[in-house]
Image (cartoon, rainbow, N blue to C red):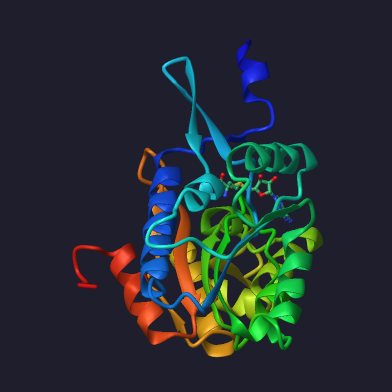
């Protein structure tokens, strides 16, 4: 089979940070399931909003390989217990079909659903379900793993007050690219930033720009971008989640490329203080005892 045939319908490996992210998710999922080990009456739901195909294609020194994606890692956990329901959302139909095939083949005993829809729509449906009489009994572990800024702020708002531990990959580097150095951001990009951050245009400008120390030719002062805007992007996002939606957010795991440049901030939001403690210990294993 050729390389291109092999890669069909699989997500592509981003870099070592992909593995770091998946290890955190899996470690947390195991801890989460351990908490409910002797509580068989507790109904546990796993929701993956950007599920992928189940496998990630990886080429190392010209040799094609695959690694397990988030779905497979979570479906493989059986001890001390499994989730009662798995709900996978993947917008790309061929990737969703590959995931469905894998589940039909390898995980027939698990109650797993795959839907090829937009995660934002399904997060709203999740919120409706969890607010219903049946849904109130569920505890949820959710994973939001977009490559870019697909997650809308309003979708997060729908989750307010719910029993969810939500791991979010915050695409701080991609978002930072829209914040042009001279503040001259196109209307399209401003709209994307507003949908993602959930704030108005003037708030974005106030937060990320300051009057320039330089004057232009006619003496008018111009604006310049604040330093550490990637870090500020995460601080703003996490702080607003904590002020408006969830009670707590963990410290972020800063994910970097092979040259040390920041790509993403990976963190968890929750309403549960024990979950917060466990989440922080997974992000920073050296500093916190579980
Ligand atoms: C980073 S990949 C996910 C990888 C996966 N979590 C894994 O570990 O294998 C992001 C996935 O989200 C899908 N996607 C993009 N936009 C989406 C949306 N709005 N709703 C649902 N899925 C989306 C892409 O097709 C892609 O497969």
For the point 80% across and 63% down, the residue is: 187
Is 47 displayed left or right of 284 in the figure?
right
- The answer to whether 80 is drawn above or below residue 12 in the figure is below
Residue 95 position (above or below residue 266): above
Residue 179 located left or right of residue 249:
right
Towards the viewer: 93 or 210: 93
- Quarter of the picture containing the N terminus is top right
Asked whether the viewer can see residue 209, the reply is no
Percent from the top left, x then y, of residue 185? Answer: 71, 61
User: In x, y percent, where is residue 287?
Assistant: 19, 69
Residue 219 placement: quadrant: bottom right
Camera-side residue of 31 and 22: 31
Quarter where residue 250 is shown: bottom left
Q: Position of residue 48 (x, y in %)?
A: 61, 58
In the rendered image, the residue lying farthest to the top is: 1
**The C terminus appears in which quarter of the rendering?**
bottom left
In the rendered view, tell whether residue 140 sits above or below residue 253.
Answer: below
Above or below, comparing residue 264 to residue 226 in the picture: above
Residue 144 at least partly seen: yes
* Residue at point 33%, 73% (across, down): 278
Closest to the observer: 209 or 98? 98
- Residue 191 coordinates in the image, percent (x, y): 77, 66
Q: How many marks do you count on the picture?
A: 0
| Pick the front one: 218 or 268 | 268
> Could you tell me which residue is drawn at 53 percent across and 89 percent down?
243
Q: Is residue 122 left or right of residue 82?
A: right
Give the residue at x 45% y 67%: 267
């Amino acid at each position: 089979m050729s390389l291109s045939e092999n890669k069909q319908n699989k997500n592509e490996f981003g870099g070592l940070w992909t593995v770091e992210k998946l290890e955190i998710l899996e470690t947390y999922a195991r801890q989460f399931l351990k908490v409910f080990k002797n509580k068989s009456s507790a109904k546990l739901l796993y929701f993956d909003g950007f599920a992928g195909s189940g496998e990630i294609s990886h080429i190392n020194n010209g040799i094609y390989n695959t690694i397990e994606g988030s779905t497979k890692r979570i479906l493989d956990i059986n001890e001390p217990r499994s989730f009662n329901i798995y709900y996978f959302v993947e917008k790309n139909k061929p990737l969703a079909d590959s995931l469905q095939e894998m589940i039909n083949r390898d995980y027939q005993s698990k109650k797993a659903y795959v839907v090829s829809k937009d995660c934002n729509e399904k997060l709203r449906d999740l919120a409706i379900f969890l607010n219903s009489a049946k849904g109130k009994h569920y505890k949820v572990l959710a994973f939001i793993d977009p490559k870019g800024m697909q997650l809308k702020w309003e979708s997060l708002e729908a989750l307010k007050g719910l029993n969810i531990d939500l791991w979010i990959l915050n695409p701080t580097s991609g978002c930072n690219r829209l914040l042009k150095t001279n503040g001259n951001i196109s209307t399209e990009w401003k709209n994307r930033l507003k949908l993602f951050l959930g704030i108005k245009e003037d708030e974005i400008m106030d937060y990320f720009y300051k009057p320039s120390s330089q004057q232009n030719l006619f003496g008018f002062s111009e604006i310049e971008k604040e330093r550490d805007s990637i870090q500020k992007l995460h601080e703003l996002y996490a702080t607003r989640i904590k002020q408006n939606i969830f009670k707590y957010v963990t410290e972020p795991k800063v994910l970097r490329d092979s040259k040390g440049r920041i790509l993403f901030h990976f963190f968890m939001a929750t309403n549960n203080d024990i979950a917060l403690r466990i989440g922080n210990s997974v992000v920073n294993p050296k500093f916190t005892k579980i």
